[in-house]
Image: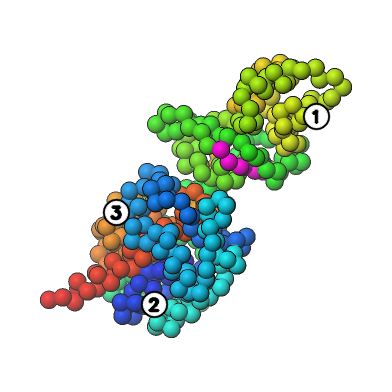
C-alpha cells in the first residue's frame, strides 16, 4: 500500500484480514496527516442522509461511486468506527461526527489494530514510480530503495494541502507510465473576486447567512441552493460555494468567469421588499435603513455598497431586485494547494470494477487520486474509505487468481 490516508489504510485492513502480508509506505513521518487536520475542528466522518441523496453528491461520477458505497456506505462506516471504540452521532445538519469530535483517537486505534494484524509501516518513503524490472522505487533518507510487491494499491491523495503529503507528485509518474489521468484541479475551494481594499480588510471572514445562490449549470439549467458562505480577502468561500464549486469552476474554464447571483433576503419576496424600502427614510443612513427594512447585517450591507451603484441604491424597486439577485462575477478558483480537496486524477475509465489499472495488472488505485469529487459534509471521507475497501479486496482477489493453476 503506497499512501497512508484513509483509502490506503482501509485497503491495508482488507488485505490483512484476508491473511496477506501487508506493507504500508508513506512519504511523511506518520500516517493520516490530512485526516487529522480535517478533524481538527470536529471530524465530519460521514453524512446521515438517505443513500440516493448521498450518492447524488458525486455529480457526474454518481453511478461509479454509488457502486463503491453499496459495499461500504455511511452506516457501515459508523459501525466500523464503533468497532474501534468510537461512537458517532448525527448533528442537526445531518453530518456525522465522533462523540468526542476528534480524529486522533480513531486514527490511533486504527493504526494499533493494523499493527496487531501484522501490517508493517514504512515512513519517509516517497514513491518515485517503477524501475525497469517493475519494482517500486522509493526515495528515503538512506537513498533510493527498490521494493518488489505481488500487488500494489496506490492511495496517494490529490494535490491539496501538499504540506501534509498530498502534493500530486505521482501525476506525471502515472502519465509517463501510460495511465489516463485528468489534470488536477481545486475542489471545495474559494473563488476570487475584485474586492475593494475596504471590503477585503474590514469584512474578510464575515459570514453571509442565510443566502440563496442562483447559477446556471453545465446543461444550461437554472439552479438554486440555500446555505451560508464567507467573505474573504480574495473573494468568497464556504460550504455553499463548495457545494456548487464544480459548476463554477467549469464556467470559468469555458467563459473566463462565472456569474453567481445571491439572494440576500431569502425570507421576503421582491415585491414585499420593494414596498418596505419605499417607506420614507427620514434621518436614517442608508446602511441603517437596509438593516431595519431589509434585515441586512453589516457584512451584507458592505457587499451591497461594494456592488450596487448609487442610482440603484436610490431606486427602491431596482434595489429590491438587486438584493434578491446580487451579481458576483467570479474570476478564478483559488490554487489547488489551498483547496480542501482535488478534482481530476486517474480517470475511472482507466480502471476495472475492482479499481485495478487496465494498463498495469496488479496495480490498484483508490481515494482522492481518482477522478471524482464531492462537497464537504462527510462525502469525501466516505468515498475514500469505500474505494480503499474495494481496492484492497480487489488486490486480494488478484493475488488469489495468480496462485490458481
Q: Earlier in the sequence, mark 3 or mark 1?
A: 1
Against 60, is 48 above or below?
below
User: Where's the N terminus, which quadrant?
Assistant: bottom left
Residue 177: quarter of image: bottom left
- Which residue lies under the disc numbered 2? 23
Cα separation between marks 2 and 3: 25 Å
Magenta stretch bounds: 226-232
User: Where's the C terminus, which quadrant?
Assistant: bottom left
- Which residue lies under the disc numbered 3? 350
Q: Earlier in the sequence, mark 1 or mark 2?
A: 2
Q: How many marks?
A: 3
Instruction: Give the x, y percent position of residue 39.
Output: 57, 62
Instruction: Give the x, y percent position of residue 378.
Output: 49, 56
Cα separation between marks 1 and 2: 64 Å
Q: Earlier in the sequence, mark 2 or mark 3?
A: 2
Q: What secondary structure is found at the residue carrying circle 3?
A: helix
Q: What secondary structure is found at the residue carrying circle 2?
A: strand
Amino acid at each position: 500500500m503506497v499512501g497512508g490516508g484513509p483509502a490506503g489504510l482501509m485497503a491495508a485492513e482488507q488485505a490483512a484480514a484476508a491473511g496477506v502480508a501487508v506493507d504500508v509506505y508513506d512519504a511523511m513521518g506518520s500516517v493520516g496527516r490530512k485526516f487529522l487536520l480535517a478533524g481538527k475542528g470536529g471530524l465530519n466522518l460521514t453524512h446521515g442522509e438517505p443513500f440516493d441523496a448521498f450518492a447524488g453528491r458525486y455529480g457526474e461520477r454518481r453511478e461509479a461511486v454509488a457502486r463503491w458505497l453499496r459495499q461500504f456506505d455511511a452506516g457501515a462506516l459508523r459501525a466500523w468506527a464503533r468497532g474501534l471504540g468510537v461512537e458517532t452521532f448525527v448533528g442537526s445538519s445531518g453530518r456525522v461526527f465522533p462523540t468526542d469530535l476528534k480524529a486522533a483517537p480513531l486514527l490511533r486505534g486504527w493504526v494499533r489494530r493494523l499493527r496487531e494484524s501484522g501490517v508493517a509501516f514504512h515512513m519517509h518513503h516517497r514513491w518515485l514510480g517503477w524501475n525497469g524490472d517493475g519494482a517500486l522505487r522509493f526515495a528515503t533518507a538512506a537513498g533510493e530503495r527498490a521494493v518488489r510487491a505481488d500487488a500494489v494499491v496506490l492511495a496517494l491523495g490529490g494535490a491539496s494541502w501538499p504540506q501534509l503529503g498530498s502534493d500530486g507528485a505521482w501525476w506525471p509518474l502515472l502519465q509517463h507510465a501510460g495511465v489516463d489521468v485528468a489534470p488536477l484541479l481545486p475542489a471545495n475551494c474559494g473563488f476570487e473576486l475584485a474586492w475593494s481594499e475596504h471590503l477585503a480588510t474590514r469584512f474578510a471572514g464575515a459570514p453571509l447567512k442565510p443566502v440563496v445562490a442562483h447559477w446556471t449549470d453545465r446543461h444550461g439549467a437554472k439552479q438554486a441552493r440555500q446555505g451560508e458562505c464567507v467573505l474573504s480577502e480574495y473573494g468568497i468561500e464556504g460550504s455553499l460555494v463548495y457545494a456548487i464549486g464544480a459548476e463554477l469552476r467549469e464556467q470559468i474554464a469555458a467563459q473566463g468567469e462565472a456569474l453567481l447571483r445571491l439572494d440576500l433576503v431569502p425570507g421576503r419576496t421582491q415585491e414585499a421588499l420593494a414596498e418596505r424600502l419605499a417607506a420614507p427614510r427620514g434621518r436614517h443612513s442608508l446602511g441603517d435603513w437596509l438593516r431595519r427594512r431589509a434585515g441586512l447585517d453589516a457584512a451584507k450591507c458592505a457587499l451591497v455598497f461594494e456592488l450596487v451603484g448609487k442610482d440603484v441604491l436610490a431606486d427602491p424597486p431596482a434595489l429590491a431586485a438587486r438584493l434578491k439577485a446580487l451579481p458576483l462575477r467570479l474570476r478564478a478558483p483559488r490554487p489547488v494547494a489551498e483547496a480542501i480537496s482535488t478534482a481530476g486524477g486517474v480517470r475511472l475509465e482507466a480502471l476495472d470494477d475492482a479499481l485495478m489499472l487496465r494498463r498495469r495488472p496488479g496495480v490498484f488505485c483508490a481515494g482522492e487520486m481518482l477522478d471524482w469529487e464531492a462537497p464537504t459534509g462527510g462525502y469525501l471521507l466516505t468515498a475514500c474509505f469505500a474505494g480503499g475497501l474495494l481496492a484492497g479486496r480487489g488486490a486480494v482477489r488478484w493475488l488469489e487468481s495468480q496462485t490458481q493453476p
